[in-house]
Image (tube, rainbow, N blue to C red):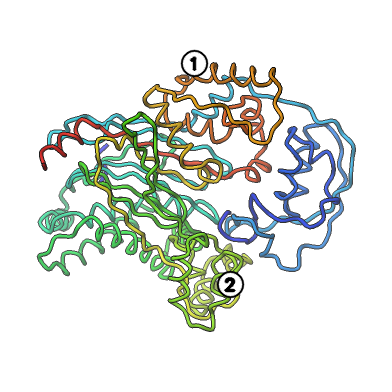
C-alpha cells in the first residue's frame, strides 16, 4: 500500500514458564532428568495440564511405552499458578492426565557448533544506513536484529522502517500474549499510524486527494524486513480503510499547530488500539477477517518503539519490553541508560496510577498477586479487550461471533472483580534523550532477554562486541569452591571466548548466544547452549520466553558534528 521497498501475561489456559507446584513427589524421575536439566530448575516450571504431553514426547524419544490414565482437571480451568503466559484464546485446554512412573535412562544429545549457529542465525537481519540519504546526514550507522522462538509459533514480532515523507527512522519490538495475532497486527500497522501522525497538513491533503482521484499514493515508509516478517495481505484493505479514516480526522481537526514527536507517538498508539477494538465490535462480512479481528482483539501485545531523527531519540513504551542506551565512558568502560520503564507490579507509580483510576472499593482487587485483577502481568497493552470492554459488550460480541469464539471458554470468561472497566490502556510512556557522541548504541528487546540478563551485562557484551575491546575483570566465582585446575579451565575458556567473539556477524545474535548459553560465571557454555536449543517445544517455553532484539548503532561523528553546530 504505502511501502516503498510480518503466555505469559495471563494465568489462563496454557500457563507459562514459572508455575508453582505443591506436590513434587508426583512427577516421574525420568522427566526431571530429561535433557540433563537440573531438577531444581524444572520442578517449579511444570503445570498439570502439560505433563502428559511432555512425558509422551520424552518417552517416545527413549522408545518406552507410557500408560496414562485421565484425571480430573483443576477446579478453576483458568488458573495454573503464578506463571506469566496464557495460551491462545482460540486453543482448547489440553486434558489433564495422571502419570505412572517408569525407570528409563535419558539419552544425551548435543548439537554441534554449526547446528547451534544455524538455529541462532535463522532469523537474523541487519541493515546499513547510508550516511547521507539525499536529505540529511544520518545519526544511525545501521542496526542488527534477531529472534529466537520459545513458543510455537513465536509470539514476538519486530519492525523497522525509514520515514520517507518526514525525517527519522522507526524501530520496534512487540511481545504478544494469548497468541501472536495482536502482536502481528500491531507490528504491521503501528508505524503507519505514527508516520501519518507526523505528516504535515499539506501532505495529508495530498494523500487524500490521490486516493479520491485514484492516483498512486506517496510512499510514506520504507520497510526493512527479514523474509519471515510477513504482512497479512488478506487484511490490507481493512487496515488501509481504518488508517484513512484516521488521517481524514487529522485533516478535519487541523488547528494550524505542528504535532511534536511525543504527541504523535501517544496519539498513534491510542488510535491504533481503538481501531483494533472497533474492528472487532463491528465485525466483517468476510468470515476469515471477522475471525481474525476478533483474535487480534482478544489477544494482546506490548510494544517498545524508538523514533530516531538526528540527535533526537524518543522511545514510546507500552508494557514490559525495554529500551537501553549503551554509553561508553572516557575510560572505555560501558554504562547503561534506561530509556523505558516496565509497566507492571514492580513499578510503584503504575500501581498508584491504576488504583487512582478505579473506586476505592477496588483498591485490594484491582492489583492482586502482582497482576491486573489477579490475571494480567503487564499493566499496559494493545488488545486484551477482556480488560477494556464492559461485560455486556463482551457477551454481545462473543454470542454474535463465529462458533470458534462462542465455544471457547476463555472468551466467555469474565475476570473476577470486574466492576469499572477499562482496566487496561495502550497509552505509551514516552522518554526523550538527546544523543551525545558517547551514546554508542540502543537496544530494544522483549522481556525474554531481560529475564535472563542484567542490563549492565547486556550493554557490556554488546559494547565489547561492537568495539572489539574486551575489558577483563578478575574472575568472580561467588560462593563456589574452585580448584586451581578449574580456575585454569575458566581462564582458558575466557581466552577462547575472546578469540571466537567475532564468529557472530550480528550483534543481536551475539547477545542471544549469551542470554541462552551463559553459565554461572558469565561465559558462554556450548554444552548448556546446545541443551537449551535442543529442548522440544513442550519444554522450551518452561525455561525461557521468546527473545527478540534490535541493536541500533549510532554514528558518533555525525552526532558530534551536530552538537558542535548547536554550540
Whether 326 is drawn above or below 26: the answer is: above
- Measured as percent of width and height from the top left, residue 474 is found at 54, 26
Q: Crowding near pointer 2: few (<14 within 10 Å), some, many (20+)? A: some
- Asked if one can make out residue 1 in the rendered structure from this viewpoint, the answer is no
Give the x, y percent position of residue 211: 18, 55
Q: Which residue is mark 2?
A: 415
Left or right: 419 as drawn, with respect to 253: right
| Residue drawn where x is 86% and y is 35% of the image | 64
Closest to the observer, 10 or 182: 10
Q: Where's the C terminus, which quadrant?
A: top left
Q: Identify the residue at horizontal 74%, vertical 38% (top origin).
A: 38
- In percent of the image, x 76 and y 64: which residue is there? 74
Whole-Å distance between the Cαs marked 2 and 1?
A: 54 Å
Query: Residue at 72% of width from left, 25% of height from top?
Result: 109
Where is residue 533? Give x, y as percent: 62, 32
Residue 306 sits above or below residue 484 on the image: below
Q: Which residue is mark 1?
A: 499
Pointers 2 and 1 in contact (CB under 8 A)? no
First in sequence, mark 2 or 1: give its number: 2
Q: Quadrant of residue 30?
A: top right
Mark 2 secondary-structure assignment: loop
**Dot 1: element:** helix
Count of picture labels: 2
- Does the image show residue 459? yes
Dot in front, 2 or 1:
1
Depth order, front residue of 426/5? 426
Between 190 and 345, which is closer to the camera in this rendering?
Answer: 345
Amino acid at each position: 500500500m504505502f511501502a516503498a521497498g510480518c503466555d505469559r501475561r495471563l494465568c489462563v489456559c496454557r500457563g507459562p514458564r514459572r508455575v508453582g507446584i505443591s506436590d513434587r513427589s508426583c512427577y516421574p524421575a525420568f522427566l526431571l532428568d530429561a535433557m540433563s536439566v537440573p531438577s531444581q530448575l524444572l520442578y517449579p516450571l511444570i503445570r498439570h495440564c502439560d505433563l502428559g504431553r511432555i512425558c509422551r514426547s520424552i518417552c517416545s524419544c527413549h522408545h518406552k511405552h507410557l500408560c496414562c490414565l485421565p484425571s480430573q482437571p483443576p477446579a478453576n480451568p483458568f488458573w495454573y499458578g503464578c506463571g506469566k503466559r496464557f495460551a491462545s484464546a482460540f486453543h482448547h485446554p489440553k486434558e489433564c492426565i495422571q502419570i505412572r512412573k517408569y525407570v528409563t535412562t535419558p539419552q544425551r544429545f548435543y548439537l554441534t557448533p554449526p547446528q547451534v549457529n544455524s538455529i541462532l542465525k535463522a532469523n537474523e537481519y541487519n541493515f546499513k544506513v547510508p550516511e547521507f540519504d539525499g536529505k540529511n546526514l544520518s545519526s544511525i550507522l545501521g542496526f542488527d536484529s534477531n529472534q529466537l522462538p520459545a513458543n510455537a509459533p513465536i509470539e514476538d514480532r519486530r519492525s523497522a522502517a525509514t520515514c520517507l515523507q518526514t525525517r527519522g527512522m522507526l524501530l520496534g519490538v512487540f511481545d504478544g500474549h494469548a497468541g501472536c495475532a495482536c502482536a502481528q497486527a500491531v507490528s504491521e500497522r503501528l508505524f503507519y499510524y505514527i508516520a501519518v501522525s507526523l505528516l504535515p497538513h499539506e501532505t495529508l491533503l495530498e494523500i487524500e486527494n490521490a486516493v479520491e482521484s485514484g492516483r498512486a499514493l506517496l510512499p510514506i515508509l520504507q520497510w526493512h524486513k527479514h523474509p519471515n516478517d510477513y504482512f497479512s495481505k488478506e487484511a490490507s484493505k481493512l487496515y488501509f480503510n481504518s488508517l484513512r479514516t484516521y488521517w481524514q480526522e487529522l485533516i478535519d481537526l487541523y488547528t494550524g499547530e505542528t504535532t511534536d514527536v511525543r504527541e504523535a507517538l501517544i496519539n498513534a498508539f491510542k488510535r491504533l488500539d481503538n481501531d483494533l477494538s472497533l474492528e472487532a465490535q463491528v465485525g466483517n462480512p468476510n468470515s476469515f477477517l471477522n475471525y481474525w479481528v476478533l483474535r487480534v482483539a482478544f489477544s494482546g501485545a506490548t510494544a517498545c518503539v524508538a523514533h530516531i531523527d538526528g540527535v533526537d531519540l524518543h522511545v514510546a513504551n507500552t508494557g514490559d519490553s525495554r529500551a537501553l542506551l549503551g554509553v561508553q565512558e572516557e575510560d572505555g568502560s560501558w554504562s547503561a541508560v534506561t530509556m523505558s520503564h516496565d509497566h507492571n507490579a514492580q513499578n510503584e507509580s503504575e500501581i498508584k496510577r491504576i488504583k487512582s483510576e478505579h473506586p476505592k472499593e477496588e483498591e485490594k482487587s484491582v492489583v492482586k498477586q502482582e497482576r491486573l485483577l489477579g490475571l494480567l502481568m503487564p499493566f499496559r497493552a494493545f488488545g486484551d479487550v477482556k480488560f477494556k470492554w464492559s461485560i455486556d459488550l463482551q457477551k454481545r460480541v462473543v454470542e454474535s461471533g463465529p462458533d470458534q469464539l462462542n465455544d471457547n471458554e476463555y472468551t466467555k470468561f469474565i475476570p473476577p472483580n470486574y466492576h469499572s472497566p477499562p482496566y487496561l490502556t495502550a497509552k505509551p510512556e514516552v522518554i526523550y534523550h538527546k544523543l551525545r557522541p558517547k551514546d554508542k548504541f540502543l537496544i530494544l528487546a522483549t522481556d525474554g532477554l531481560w529475564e535472563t540478563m542484567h542490563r549492565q551485562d547486556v550493554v557490556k557484551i554488546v559494547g565489547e562486541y561492537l568495539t572489539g575491546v574486551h575489558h577483563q575483570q578478575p574472575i568472580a566465582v561467588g560462593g563456589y569452591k574452585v580448584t586451581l585446575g578449574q580456575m585454569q579451565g575458566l581462564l582458558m575458556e575466557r581466552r577462547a571466548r575472546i578469540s571466537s567473539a567475532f564468529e557472530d556477524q550480528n550483534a543481536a545474535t551475539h547477545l542471544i548466544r549469551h542470554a541462552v548459553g551463559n553459565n554461572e560465571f558469565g561465559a558462554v557454555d556450548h554444552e548448556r547452549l546446545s541443551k537449551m536449543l535442543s529442548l522440544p517445544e513442550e519444554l522450551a517455553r518452561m525455561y525461557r520466553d521468546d527473545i527478540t532484539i534490535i541493536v541500533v548503532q549510532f554514528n558518533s561523528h555525525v552526532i558530534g558534528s551536530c552538537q558542535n553546530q548547536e554550540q
